[in-house]
Each structure stands twice: as structure tokens, then as C-alpha cells.
Amino acid sequence: MDKIRKHIIFEGYVQGVGFRYKAYHTARMYGISGWVRNRSDGTVEMEAEGTPHDIEDLILALEKHTWGQIDNIRSEKIPLHNDYSFEIR
């Protein structure tokens, strides 16, 4: 299956709850490359590159994160970067 890359913004109670670490470990589990970081407005920003199914599974796993709460997710497809790993920035 072809890879895609998505730029994703998670809104809600997503900082200070281990969200980036959950994203990091889950992305690595699904073989997704990219990065995740906190933004100054209280949201978490992510770029994820992998199969559409794996990215969907990553997002579903993050929605089940029990320590925080996602109120809204905004995403858009962006050009591939062909990264080899996933990092916390």
C-alpha cells in the first residue's frame, strides 16, 4: 500500500499528560515515521508518514489515551518526506 504523510493538530487536554510519549511509542509500533511536538497554544502537532491504515490506527490509539482528552483533530495530507524514524521534538 502506498504511503501518505499527514499534518495533524490535536486539540484538548493533550499537554502534560504523556501524549507525545504515547504518540512516539505507538507510531514506532506501527512503523510510522515523522515527529510530534507541543505547541505554545496548548495543542499538539504531529506529522505522520505511513500507510493510511497505519495512520488511522495511530490516531485511534491516541483517541483512547486515558490520561488526557482530545476535543478535536485537524489533519491534512502533505508531501512525503521519506523519514526513517519518529521523534519527539
Image (tube, rainbow, N blue to C red):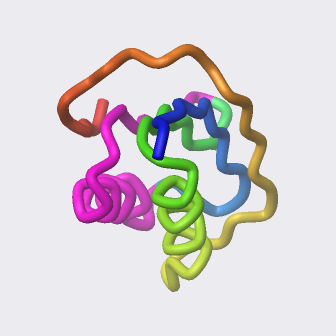
Query: Magenta stretch: residue 10 in it?
Result: no
What residue is rendered at 59% in x and 60% in y?
Answer: 56
**Residue 64 on image: x %, y %:** 56, 81
Determine if residue 38 is in view.
no
Front residue of 42/74: it is 74
Front residue of 44/83: it is 83
Q: Is residue 8 left or right of residue 65?
A: right
What residue is rendered at 72% in x and 50% in y?
Answer: 11
**70 shown above or below 6:** below
Q: Is residue 76 left or right of residue 65?
A: right
**5 shown above or below 52:** above
**Residue 48 on image: x %, y %:** 46, 38
The magenta segment is 16-40
**Residue 66 on image: x %, y %:** 51, 85
Front residue of 54/26: it is 54
Determine if residue 53 is in view.
yes
